[in-house]
Amino acid sequence: MNIRPAQGHEAETLSALALKAKANWGYPADTIELWKQDLTVSAHTITSRPTFVAVLGNEIIGFYSLSPSHHSWKLDHLWVLPQFMDRGIGRALVAHALETAARGGASSVTVDADPNAESFYLACGADRCGEVPAPIPGQPERVRPQLALRAL
């Protein structure tokens, strides 16, 4: 696997990858449709923010995107295709994102995580610093964990 900068023309591929990964957690199709805009990656995002892809052969199997700020950057996206999950690709992308943020002057990276991804980020060394209400049909008490990772 290789991690390289994403290219603007890959926006559609990255958006489709994010949707597949999110759907893998068993959310109903109508709920995924509500999140489609948030899961869409534009060419502008790719060219204006640090965005990197994990590639195996010629296939993009994962990616991340960061929003730079002063000392704390935000991890906007981190997705891995379902068939490549649990192979260390997500961890490699997190490590790469933390290095990228540190090189950019950040001391931490924050994550507004899906509840299903919290254990992954905690295993990567994140600390939970809060939560925000995120109810969906059938899960009125759902919350999104707010996490922070120390930049490397």
Image (cartoon, helix red, strand yellow):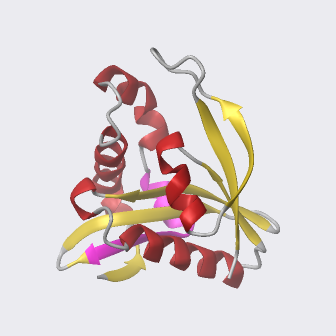
Residue 61 sits in quarter: bottom left
Residue appearing at x 53%, y 54% in the figure: 119
- Whether 53 is among the magenta residues is yes
Q: Position of residue 45 (x, y in %)?
A: 51, 56
> Can you give x and y, in whole percent of width and height, for residue 12 in the image?
30, 51
**Residue 133 within the segment the image draws in magenta:** no
11 to the left or right of 70 = left
Residue at left offset 56%, top offset 60%: 121
Which of the pair 45/59 is nearer the observer? 59
Stretch in magenta: 42-55
Residue drawn at the location 43% of the way across and 42% of the way down? 39
Give how far across and how far down residue 127 sits, in percent.
71, 59
**86 horizontally vs 72: left or right:** left
Total numbered badges shown on the rendered structure: 0
Image quadrant where residue 52 sits = bottom left
Q: Observer-nearest residue: 100 or 28?
A: 28
Which residue shows up at 28% across the image and 45% down it?
Answer: 20
